[in-house]
Amino acid sequence: MPFLGQDWRSPGQNWVKTADGWTRFLAERENSSGSFASERNSYCRKEDYNKENILNSMNCDVAVKKRKKDQLNNKTKIQYFHQEKWIYVHKGSTKERHGYCTLGEAFNRLDFSSAILDSRRFNYVVRLLELIAKSQLTSLSGIAQKNFMNILEKVVQKVLEDQQNIRLIRELLQTLYLSLCTLVQSVGKSVLVGNINMWVHRMETILHWQQQLNNIQITRPAFKGLTFTDLPLCLQLNIMQRLTDGRDLVSLGQVAPSLQVLSEDRLLWKKLCHYHFTDRQIRKRLIMSEKGHLDWKKMYFKLVRCYPRKEQYGDSLQLCRHCHILSWKGTDHPCTANNPEGCLTSLSPQDFINLFRF
């Protein structure tokens, strides 16, 4: 009877057993039809031959499906996302569970693809992508690196459509490009997963995204109603105090002369400095103006270069101290604690990275 070889390099081959040993059946078919029929009758009944034709057609179907799958993997962007929105974080082997959870596995399992569509989670995901691009890109698996690029493409497309957070994504792409330039120079030391040509193509894609962001044209809304400058000055100042980035204040002051005056308010920059930095940090970077007053605006940009700013997000990942499950806020996870809400700890993007440093 025919034997289907389980060769890992192909979907299988047909072999038949003869008096001289096993012979590849496909090679026998290359002979003339008359000799082939006589040889078939010598060692194979008609029923076996029909079965073998069925198996041969099945193998052809498998080969076609495999070839189509390979072409799909090469030409399309497959995203390996899981349906679960939580993952069990374990750092060592136990009797019940072997191995440990890696950063790449957590990046694949958590729902970052949908998180970027949520305005409360967008800045959190972007900051996490930036930290991974700086130092953790080589710790990701091949699938995780592919997911990283796919999520980044979604982020860029969202920014191009919404015309928001342009500067934030520019900085992210610049950080990623500089990191890849350093890593590509170290090719041959197994620092990147995949072919060098693939990474060069990805770097060209990043440059294309940067060009798209540089050429973006902000469209003015067609609605002609009440604008920001039409609001009372006290309300304008109250809204400006909600901004946590000094560069946003500078950009807002360039819109209109009246906003330029408000953006230079000393109390506004003083509150911004005290929001991000401690009193001790502020005392070490005092800058006096020509009038003898503290120049809070210059102090802010000086402090930003010396110390990290305070990070605050509308939504973030959280870790359950009882069951060690990592999930998004508001996402249910299987926990056996009597009070699961009291066991949750919010994680900053840097805390998320540190969670997988062994």
Image (spheres, helix red, strand yellow):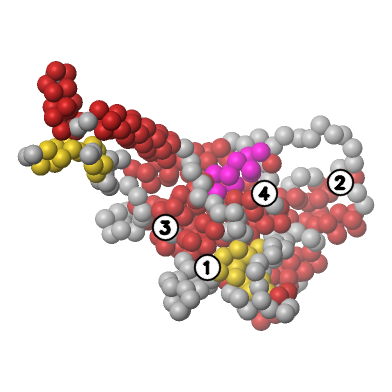
Front-lying residue, 213 or 255: 213
Query: From the viewer's perspective, is residue 141 above or below residue 215?
Result: below
- Mark 4 crowdedness (10 Å alpha carbons): few <14, some 14-19, many ≥20: few
x and y percentages locating residue 38 in the rendered image: 13, 23
Q: Is residue 118 left or right of residue 132?
A: right
Q: Earlier in the sequence, mark 1 or mark 2?
A: 2
Image quadrant where one finds the C terminus: bottom left
What residue did someone put label 3 on? 141
Per the rendered image, the range of residues in magenta is 151-161
What residue did someone put label 1 on? 353
Mark whose residue sits in front, 2 or 4: 4
Q: Is residue 185 left or right of residue 307?
A: left
Q: Quadrant of residue 136?
A: bottom left
Q: Quadrant of residue 60?
A: top left
Q: Earlier in the sequence, mark 3 or mark 1?
A: 3
Please report the residue visible at 64 percent of the width from the left and 44 percent of the height from the top: 159
- In the current view of this chain or complex, which residue is farthest to the bottom? 280
What residue did someone put label 4 on? 117
Q: Are marks 3 and 4 in contact (CB under 8 Å)?
A: no
- Mark 3 crowdedness (10 Å alpha carbons): few <14, some 14-19, many ≥20: some
The type of residue carrying mark 1 is Ile
Please report the residue visible at 36 percent of the width from the left and 55 percent of the height from the top: 192
Per the model, the C-alpha gap separating discs 2 and 4 is 30 Å
The type of residue carrying mark 2 is Thr
Q: Is residue 39 visible?
A: yes
- In the current view of this chain or complex, which residue is farthest to the right? 232
Q: Is residue 60 visible?
A: no
Q: Which mark is residue 229?
A: 2
Q: Earlier in the sequence, mark 2 or mark 4?
A: 4
Per the model, the C-alpha gap separating discs 3 and 4 is 25 Å
Magenta stretch: includes residue 153: yes
Front-lying residue, 101 or 37: 37
